[in-house]
Image (spheres, helix red, strand yellow):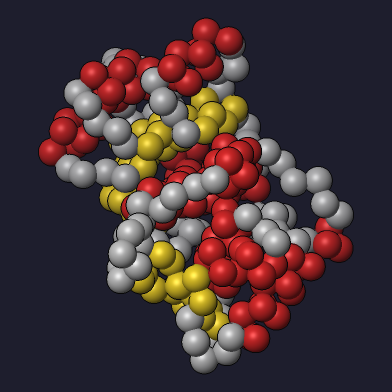
């Protein structure tokens, strides 16, 4: 379970953030705070995976809170959601290692893209995977909007293409009843490992596939998938 906190002084926006975040399987909003000082007290005592953070707040601002977090060696991922779109705020936030930066007002699709970016990074780093340049490029570019036609998408919130999903599903069916590694799937489909994991995360969320971790590789662990 991905433990998340929301730090937002606007009660309505905080409620929207919570609703959007909890649409994603395995994300649990552990707490919501309306000022930076209360959030900081909580962060010092609790392990948090992800912070959804506003910039402008009474008392301790979002940037001041983020500075405290980094100064204390806390590497929690942060998605900043704010009305501030000036270069100084954006530059400072980037220097403090935020994962993404959303400008209010935003739509669910943009929020979902930021969460998807976090989940993919989280799973890859958690499983100590190795990446080639193509994987890394895709990981850093995930927040960009996809410009496919609606007829070619599974859903705008996912940003996935039907033809790619069909290709991956067909490959999984060739190995029905057995697990196949993400590396093998990538090789058979000529897709990157990042793309494979995005689509497999979708299939797992739809309960049409499952995954496990192979620790017996003699090196880095490998993610294995099987169609249900």
Measured along the vertical axis of the image, is residue 106 above or below residue 167? above
Residue displayed at 49% across by 87% down: 178
Seen as rendered, the residue at the extreme left is: 45
Q: Seen in the image, is 222 located left or right of residue 227?
A: left
Residue displayed at 40% across by 34% down: 78
* Quadrant in the rendering for residue 220: bottom left
* Quadrant in the rendering for residue 224: bottom left
Seen as rendered, the residue at the extreme front is: 218
Q: Nearer the viewer, residue 117 or 29?
A: 117
Residue displayed at 33% across by 23% down: 66
* Quadrant in the rendering for residue 102: top right
Residue displayed at 33% across by 59% down: 219
Residue 10 in sight here: no
Q: Nearer the viewer, residue 166 or 214?
A: 214
Q: Nearer the viewer, residue 17 or 150?
A: 150
Seen as rendered, the residue at the extreme top is: 88
């Amino acid at each position: 379970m991905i433990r998340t906190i929301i730090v937002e002084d606007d009660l309505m926006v905080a409620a929207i953030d919570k609703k959007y975040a909890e649409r994603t399987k395995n994300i649990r909003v552990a707490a919501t705070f309306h000022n930076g000082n209360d959030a900081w007290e909580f962060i010092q005592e609790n392990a948090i995976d992800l912070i959804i953070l506003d910039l402008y707040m009474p008392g301790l601002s979002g940037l001041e809170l983020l500075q405290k977090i980094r100064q204390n060696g806390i590497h929690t991922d942060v998605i900043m959601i704010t009305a501030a779109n000036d270069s100084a705020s954006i530059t400072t936030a980037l220097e403090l290692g935020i994962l993404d930066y959303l400008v209010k007002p935003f739509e669910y699709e943009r929020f979902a893209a930021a969460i998807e970016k976090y989940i993919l990074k989280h799973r890859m780093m958690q499983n100590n995977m190795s990446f080639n340049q193509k994987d890394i490029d895709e990981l850093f570019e995930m927040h960009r909007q996809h410009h496919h036609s609606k007829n070619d998408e599974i859903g705008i919130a996912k940003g996935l293409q039907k033809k790619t999903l069909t290709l991956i599903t067909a490959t999984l069916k060739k190995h029905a009843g057995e697990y196949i590694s993400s590396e093998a799937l990538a090789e058979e489909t000529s897709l990157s490992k990042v793309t494979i994991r995005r689509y497999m995360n979708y299939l797992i969320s739809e309960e049409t596939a499952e995954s496990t971790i192979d620790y017996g590789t003699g090196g880095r662990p490998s993610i294995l998938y099987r169609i249900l």
